[in-house]
Image (cartoon, rainbow, N blue to C red):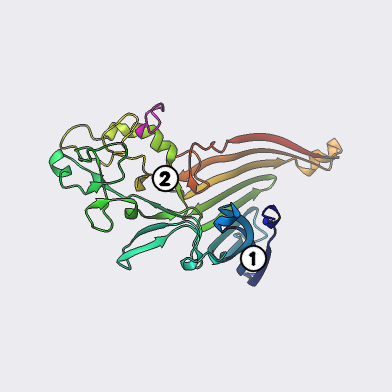
Amino acid sequence: ILANSELKWEQSKTYDAGLDLGLLNNRLTFLFDYYRRVTDNLLTSLALPQSTGFASTLTNLGSLENKGFEIEVNLRVLPNNSAFQWNLSFNASKVKNKILKLPYNGVENNRIGGMYLWNAKKKTYTWQGGLQEGGKMGDLYAYKEVGVYSTDEEAASAPTDMIMTGVTDRTKFGGDVNWLDADGNDSIDDRDRVYVGNTYPTWTGGFSNTFSYKNLQLYVRMDYETGHTIYNDLLVEATYQTHGNNGISTLELKSWQKPGDKTDIPQYLWFDRNRRSISRGNSMFYEKGDYLAIREVTLSYSLPAKLLKRLKLSNIRFNATANNLYYFTKYRGLNPENGDQDNGRYPVPRIFSFGANVGF
């Protein structure tokens, strides 16, 4: 019976409203589209009574709303009679998700998962993150680093760190991280984590430019994402040796080394067993993945008609293409294209190709 209840199907309803304008004698085209999509019967986890012998089962009871808008602009910059031509295209989209329905489980908002944290706006503790009706997916929470204690005397006033594991002495020293005591109770515990971002991008889109002169054409395409957050776990491991066998990051060159040092990189501790510094999850390693990528550059040349006539061919077109040339980004990992956790992603490879198109 439990196996049969794991039905993998969904239904969706989409509502669209659009606008299409042609301006400047159709040299400029503007398109705007607003949509709202509700997807029902998504797979979610349903808690079961203990008498069944199972903790939960998958069932089709979830409902998710995605709504947003898309913009597209196409511009022929120069008039048709110009020998040099330039066509410009731009598109952008923004989307928000909202959880509308989850299986009933007897808790507020039918919450699944989540964390009980201090809510600075409400001045009380509330359940945050996870999945809950009225909330969104992909929220991330972590302990916030305020700084690094410069001296033992400065560290003496630190809140009691209850996250440290495997130790009996919780004394803080110079070179240790100064964690935010969000609720101000002079103790650092699970409830002190704060919102640090979301795994899903806020904006996505791209640009393309096509330049042409006689038989020569240059095409340049770029795309971007903004608003998503990535936990750079690979950099954490390289910087703080959380597994004890990684190469050391160059961030260690600015780590705390002696009393009086002012820095945001704590003292280097090989294999940070007692979690004094970083391995619990530090806000400074939840990085924005915003990027602008040069996705494609193609240069092409078509042989003149007179030469084609001599060769008895309809067309010959040569092209050289480069893909994934460069990322403009502040993300310190190898691939900024997806949110969530980076445990060592493969970089997107640069690809160079050459070709010819011959028509007989």
- Does residue 72 appear to the left or right of 262 in the view shown? right
> Which of the 4 image quarters holds residue 74?
bottom right
Q: Nearer the viewer, residue 139 or 331?
A: 139
- Does residue 358 appear to the left or right of 61 in the view shown? right
Label 2 sits on a secondary structure element that is loop
Mark 1 = which residue? Answer: 40
- Does residue 231 appear to the left or right of 61 in the view shown? left
On residue 88, the disc is none
Q: Nearer the viewer, residue 105 or 202?
A: 105
**Is residue 27 placed above or below 83 in the rendered structure?**
below
**Is residue 343 placed above or below 245 in the rendered structure?**
below
Residue 247 magenta-drawn? yes
Q: Amino acid at mark 1?
A: Asp
**Is residue 252 placed above or below 286 in the rendered structure?**
above
Label 1 sits on a secondary structure element that is strand
* Residue at 38% over, 58% down: 116
